[in-house]
Image (cartoon, helix red, strand yellow):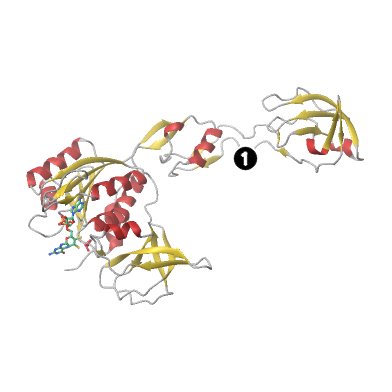
Amino acid sequence: MSLMPVAEARARLLDGVAPLGTEQVPLAQANGRVLAEDLAATRTQPPFPASAMDGYAVRLSDLETLPATLEVVGEAPAGHGFAGALAPGQAVRIFTGAPVPEGADAILIQEDARRDGDTVTALERPAPGQFIRPAGLDFRKDEALIHAGARLDYRTLALAAAMNHARLPVRRRPLVAIVATGDELVPPGAEPGPDQIIASNHAGVAALVEDCGGTPLDLGIAPDDQTAIAAKVREALQAGADILVTLGGASVGDHDLVQEVLGGEGMDLAFWKIAMRPGKPLMAGRLGSMKVLGLPGNPVSSLVCALLFLRPLIAAMLGRSPDLFEETAVLGGPVAENDRRQDYLRATLSRHDDGTLVVHPFDRQDSSMLALLAKSGALIVRAPFAPPLHAGTPVPILRL
Ligand SMILES: Nc1nc2c(c(=O)[nH]1)N[C@H]1C(S)=C(S)[C@@H](COP(=O)(O)OP(=O)(O)OC[C@H]3O[C@@H](n4cnc5c(N)ncnc54)[C@H](O)[C@@H]3O)O[C@H]1N2
Ligand code: MOO
């Protein structure tokens, strides 16, 4: 049976996905949100030529010969400019952030001055414009400084505040309903029966959804029963989920019912089974306006598929680039020839003494081994039918 290439599956999943709507949030709630529109400055910063140092605003023509003594005619602390212009022979005591009075063309820092009552003596001559921040040094009114699609963080939020935006237009967070399926599963903290295990995929996928800027909606565990699974699907629809993620039951076994149930609920299947390891039984489709992603049950398959498919899907809904950021590292050990599935090998990531990134694949790659995933720093990407490679060869990686 032919399997769909990973890139084609991703393109099908993302086909027709448009960014979600916009909402306005206060600055204090905007951390991690995605900007929906380019943001322009409402003002110029600094709005006036400002002193960058504590000292004296001076006219350089008064400082041709040193030492030069000037009359101190006033004070300009930050927030209170000196009213008036500086005449020849005059100086204004000035502090960092204060408007530089007209007529002044440099700031004499106080370390280079000797104050004596109403006069100050300059011991050094500053360069023209020294320690004066021109108006608009940081940015000018109407300049677009943060662009649509930016994930807001401490830097851009500080900038938005300086631009005098108290509320920001951000994309609505995609709501991602998550349903696990399987009689063998009990939630973390519960007492599993003798043939049961703990459902782990939920916790991982929900965390990834949050990291990507989505809101996870935990719909719990459905037993391997069509009616129970269908009820969860309807719950997701009723909640207005943008994405439904199912965990497990995606393969070919008698108890792998997810696709059948979703088909019965009216899902258009985009694909099922792809040339990827881990993650072969990945399934995707659309149920009304809700995207459906059926992740395989094996824990590592679930999380690697979430990384490679769910993350780009959420990114597209947020108006961000869905592209994965591949880097290059050199192999720390050999890898075998690959078969027809694109392989994502769990590996540790370190650096040689000379700074070269080194990626060291684990020998065993079973898709049930979560502990190895947690230990990994990267996934090595192996194209279908890639030849065997020896240590020292550069390979594409995805950082975890
Ligand atoms: N005859 C075949 N058997 C299998 C094939 C195949 O092509 N032919 N594919 C294998 C591959 S590859 C994968 S991956 C798995 C995926 O199957 P399912 O998506 O149907 O997953 P389940 O059978 O439900 O579970 C697989 C495995 O993972 C455990 N699991 C399930 N859900 C969770 C969860 N939420 N948290 C933790 N662990 C979970 C489950 O207990 C099983 O051990 O199918 C292969 N079989
Ligand atoms: O695709 Mo499965 O994820 O190989 O174990």
Quadrant hosting ligand 2:
bottom left
Q: Mark 1: which secondary structure?
A: loop
| Residue positioned 33% across, 42% down in the render | 214
Q: Is residue 106 visible?
A: no
Which residue occupies the foreground of this view, 315 or 344?
Answer: 344
Looking at the image, residue 336 sits to the left or right of residue 60; the answer is: left
Name the foreground residue: 202 vs 343.
202
On-image quarter of the C terminus: bottom left
Counting from the top left corner in percent of width and height, residue 108 is at 80, 37
Residue at 49% x, 37% y is: 157
Horizontal relation, residue 68 to residue 381: left or right: right
The residue beneath circle 1 is 138
- Taking the view exactly as shown, the residue that stands out farthest to the top is 83
At label 1, the amino acid type is: Asp
Rendered location of residue 328, percent (x, y): 44, 66
Residue 6 pos. (x, y %): 28, 62
Image quadrant in which you'd find residue 124: top right
**What percent of the width, then of the height, locates residue 307?**
32, 54
Crowdedness of circle 1 by 10 Å Cα count: few (<14), some, many (20+)?
few
Q: Residue at x 43, y 62 (%)?
A: 327
- In this orientation, does residue 342 appear? yes
